[in-house]
Amino acid sequence: MPRLMVVEDEPAILSVLTTILRKEGYEVVPYANGESALKSIEEDEYDLMLTDIRMEPVNGLQLLALMRKARPQTPVVLLTGYGSVKTAVDSMKGGAFDYITKPFKVDELLVTVRRALEYRAVVVENVGLKAQLEARLRLSAIVAESVQMRQICEMIERVAPTEATVLIIGESGTGKEVVARAVHENSLRKTKRFIPVNCAAMPEPLLESEMFGHVKGAFTGASSDKTGLFEASEGGTIFLDEIGAMPLSIQAKFLRVLQDKTIRKVGGTESYPVDVRVIAATNEPLEKLIEKGTFREDLYYRISVIPLRLPPLRERREDIIPLVSHFLRRERPAGAPVPKLDSSAETVLENYRWPGNVRELENAIRHALTFFRGESIMRDDLPARVVEGAAHAKDAPPSSREAAPEEFRGRSLKTFLRQKERDYVQMVVDKMDGDKEAAAVALKVSLTTLYRKLSPNDE
């Protein structure tokens, strides 16, 4: 039931408006003057405000300005006498939906109210769709055709809006920083900074200074105060990659940051509050480091509130060719044609074990783009180690392909199924008269996935 705020300082008109609108099934909250409505605008939610212009001490234009600021999605309809029509028209430039002159006609009033409520419904729907689209775009860097990666995306959407500390676990090259950025971009901190720190890339003294900052004279060469990365991340997210390499002495100070939400600069005596979300990542089990005595157990429990385990690429082979399509589109200059992937190259890519995971696949595609000629990337355009590694893969012995008839050689089952899938998706799009959004809804896939499955580079 739509909820309407009605503000009118003439009791008789207020009573008539309230009666008419309630008979139409609306929930009406009447206010006898503008002053009494001020607080409710900021604290309560309404689907529509209907207000007179001329009131004292707070008039309708002041209420309009406040509603536009506090509830921009709530339409405002103004009531005005004939002498104030110009004022009402001018106020529409300030955001009023419409105006009604007094004495008003009941039919005119009801039509205007219905139009305003329909307008609000469209605005609210558009805001929701925009939020969904933004969420999809923020996850667009993650290719998730496999069940495992779809589950990761679901976890990101659920975890991101919280303040929980996240520990991302995965082999080198699995995309831990990509996932960390996705958590940040889907969080309430998305407008603030995301700062990555590689804990294994800096020696202990430098790491401590970089993370917490230092004061002038703290050590030789400290000629001025330095802002640490925790301070620089204020209100945002700090990503601590390879946290298992963090020295024990710094682990103790980092634990204090998590517990007290404060930092102390190197050489300093004062503590400063910080508001930072921490996302950590490791490519080795921290439990083993705890057993070795190189990682604090209490810190482990602090950072692993939400663990996200990224599977290696060899365990999610459904993502290999979609990832290739993603890299091909991204690496080509704007306006340049995107090369196709020959079936012989596809077979190599699918059979290789990818010990370097997604990062190695990305580098392999960059290599291929450097050497390919013509319209397609061929087997010989790929790095030699990838071609040789695929030939020795246990799950794809070369003899079985060499023995195959010519018409089937180099054409895998996955290639065949992908083509049939593309044909079916195209048929649904055609049935929807080219409306890809409607087709995506019918197929129960995202619009991004639909475009990818239609792309010839997804072969």
Image: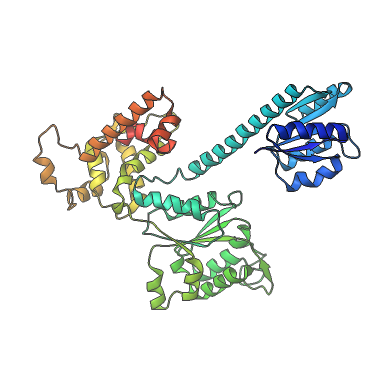
- Give 109 or 329, whichever is nearer the viewer: 109
Work out which quarter of the rendered image holds the C terminus and state it.
Answer: top left
Q: How many marks?
A: 0
Residue 420 x %, y %: 26, 32
Colour mode? rainbow
Residue drawn at x 45%, y 74% as measured from the top left: 295
Residue nearest the observer in this picture, 32 or 424: 32
Near-viewer residue (207 or 58):
58
Classify 189 as above or below 331: below
Quarter location, residue 110 = top right
Q: Residue at x 75, y 46 (%)?
A: 42
Question: Left or right: 255 with respect to 65?
Answer: left
Q: Residue 237 occupies which quadrant of the picture?
A: bottom right
Give the residue furthest to the right. Answer: 56
Residue 45 location (% of width, % of height): 70, 44
In the rendered structure, the answer to whether residue 392 lies left or right of residue 33 reads left
Residue 54 picture quarter: top right
- What residue do we see at 81% from left, 38% from top? 63
Quarter of the rendering occupied by the N terminus = top right
Residue 52 visible? The answer is: no
The answer, for residue 362, to whether it is visible in the render is yes
Percent x, y for residue 311?
Answer: 35, 56
